[in-house]
Image: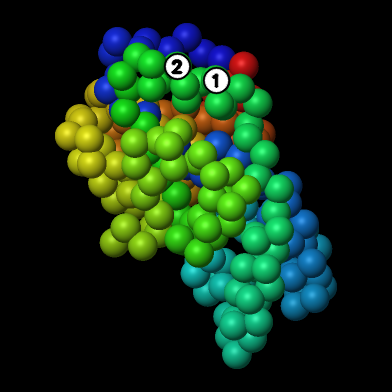
């Protein structure tokens, strides 16, 4: 884990998938199945989906089967309800240290509240780990727009230079960078060479 200055930063904002939970491999399996069914002529299409919000995925890659979006969403909801929400290594200790030093923390995710119910069922203590949890319903614009992270800062009355954003996806990294906060990239979804385009602060986990 990078050296973290607990006295300099007042709030830490975390994306969910690939940042708090190591779920990206499970999403790749789901989208691989969907892509193979609808677009077998485009092998590896699921790799291009990483880090996109659902509406963006549907509009970009499944526009030709718009009448089946309901079925895709239903399968995705079912998949998410049975996923393994395993913490990225070292995360629980890191979040506890932030709280101990008085650093405000929030999840800032494009996931919706319905999905979060599955998270809470698997981790009943999850809400207590953070000072706030912001989901897709709380934002006017999706990543890569910085709206979500600016709202996270506003929740705590923090300025960009007092804030750290943890992200893993390209759209998320763009969003965090545009917010003006210190940006930390996690190599859980994308390789280091892609993350380097947005930040030099790169970690593989929180250990």
Q: Give residue 97's mark.
A: 2
Please tell me in which quadrant of the rendered image residue 161 appears: top left
Identify the residue shown where x is 45% and y is 33%: 129
| Secondary element at tag 2 | helix
Image side of residue 193 versus residue 116, left or right: right
Identify the residue shown where x is 71% and y is 58%: 82
Image side of residue 156 versus residue 112, left or right: left
Mark 2: few/some/many CA within 10 Å (<14, 14-19, 20+):
few
**Quadrant the C terminus occupies:** top right
Mark 1: few/some/many CA within 10 Å (<14, 14-19, 20+):
few
Identify the residue shown where x is 29% and y is 50%: 147
- Disc 1 target residue: 93
Total labels: the figure holds 2
Give x and y (percent) for residue 139. Answer: 31, 58
Q: Give residue 123's mark.
A: none
Image side of residue 113 versus residue 157, left or right: right
Give x and y (percent) for residue 59. Answer: 53, 74
In the image, is residue 109 above or below residue 45? above
Query: Looking at this view, is 45 or 168 the one in front?
Result: 168
Q: Are marks 1 and 2 in contact (CB under 8 Å)?
A: yes
In the image, is residue 136 above or below residue 97? below
In the image, is residue 203 above or below residue 39? above
Identify the residue shown where x is 29% and y is 10%: 7
């Amino acid at each position: 884990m990078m050296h973290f200055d607990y006295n300099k930063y007042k709030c830490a904002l975390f994306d969910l998938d690939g940042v708090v939970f190591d779920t990206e491999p499970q999403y790749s399996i789901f989208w691989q199945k969907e892509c193979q069914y609808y677009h077998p002529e485009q092998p590896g299409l699921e790799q291009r989906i990483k880090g996109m919000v659902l509406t963006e995925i549907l509009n970009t890659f499944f526009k030709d089967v718009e009448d089946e979006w309901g079925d895709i969403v239903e399968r995705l909801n079912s998949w998410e309800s049975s996923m393994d929400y395993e913490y990225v290594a070292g995360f629980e200790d890191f979040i506890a240290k932030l709280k101990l030093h008085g650093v405000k923390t929030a999840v800032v995710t494009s996931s919706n509240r319905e999905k979060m119910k599955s998270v809470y069922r698997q981790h009943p203590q999850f809400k207590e780990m953070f000072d706030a949890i912001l989901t897709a319903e709380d934002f006017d614009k999706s990543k890569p727009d910085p709206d979500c992270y600016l709202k996270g800062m506003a929740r705590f009355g923090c300025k960009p230079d007092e804030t750290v954003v943890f992200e893993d996806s390209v759209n998320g990294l763009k969003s965090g960078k545009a917010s003006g906060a210190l940006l930390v990239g996690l190599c859980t979804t994308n390789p280091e060479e892609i993350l380097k385009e947005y930040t030099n602060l790169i970690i593989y986990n929180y250990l």
